[in-house]
Amino acid sequence: MAQTTVDGVEGVQSLVGQHLGYSDWVTITQEQVQQFADATGDQQWIHVDPERAKQHSPFGGPIAHGYLTLSLLPSLVPQIVTITGFSMGVNYGTEKVRFPSPVPVGARVRAGATMESATPFAGGVAMNLGVTMEIEGGTKPAMVATVVYRRYV
């Protein structure tokens, strides 16, 4: 169940500047990393060769792709916020994405979100969510992004 629930354009606008909550923790597995590598063609050894990564990478083992971390948002953001009163919503893009810290395979991550802006347009609202992906026990976030969503009435 989402930590924040809101209805309609005015409801979304009322959240500007507010932290909306956190998703559940999710464990990053080597199987996930391999599936992502297979889907994207990014077979770099720091992701898909655990023995080589353990012996030769500066990370001490395999790490998740940065874009794998970003790709978790469609499953994690709905755990944070539920928005009703719209017929549909789309992921419109990102304004900024950074990956300050690698995510080791086996680590747990979660997303936290803040409503940065909510701009009405004819037929809906554009929302900028500031999303931070935390690594359990980490000192720096795995990902910091401004994600743009559009909701249509």
Image (cartoon, rainbow, N blue to C red):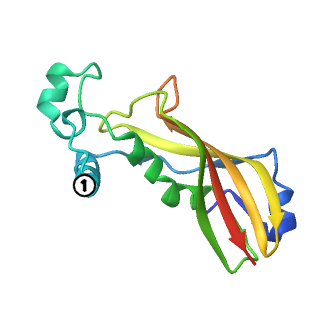
- Residue 68 in the image: state x and y as whole percent: 38, 47
Judge by depth and name the residue closer to the eye, 8 or 123. 123
What's the residue at 70%, 51% (across, down)?
128
Quadrant in which the C terminus appears: bottom right
Count how many numbered circles sit on residues in the image: 1
Quadrant housing residue 65: top left
- Residue 43 in the image: state x and y as whole percent: 20, 43
Question: In the displayed structure, would residue 106 be above or below residue 122?
Answer: above
Check disc 1 and report the residue beneath it: 35
What's the residue at 78%, 50% (across, down)?
117
Quadrant housing residue 130: top right
What's the residue at 82%, 50% (across, down)?
16
For mark 1, give the secondary structure: helix
Judge by depth and name the residue closer to the eye, 127 or 79. 127
Judge from the rendering whether residue 108 lies leftward or rightward of residue 21; answer left or right. left
Question: In the displayed structure, would residue 107 be above or below residue 72?
Answer: above
Judge from the rendering whether residue 132 lies leftward or rightward of residue 72; answer left or right. right
Quadrant housing residue 126: bottom right
- Residue 102 in the image: state x and y as whole percent: 39, 30
Q: Amino acid at mark 1?
A: Gln
Question: In the displayed structure, would residue 90 be above or below residue 103?
Answer: below
Quadrant in which the N terminus appears: bottom right
- Residue 85 in the image: state x and y as whole percent: 76, 77
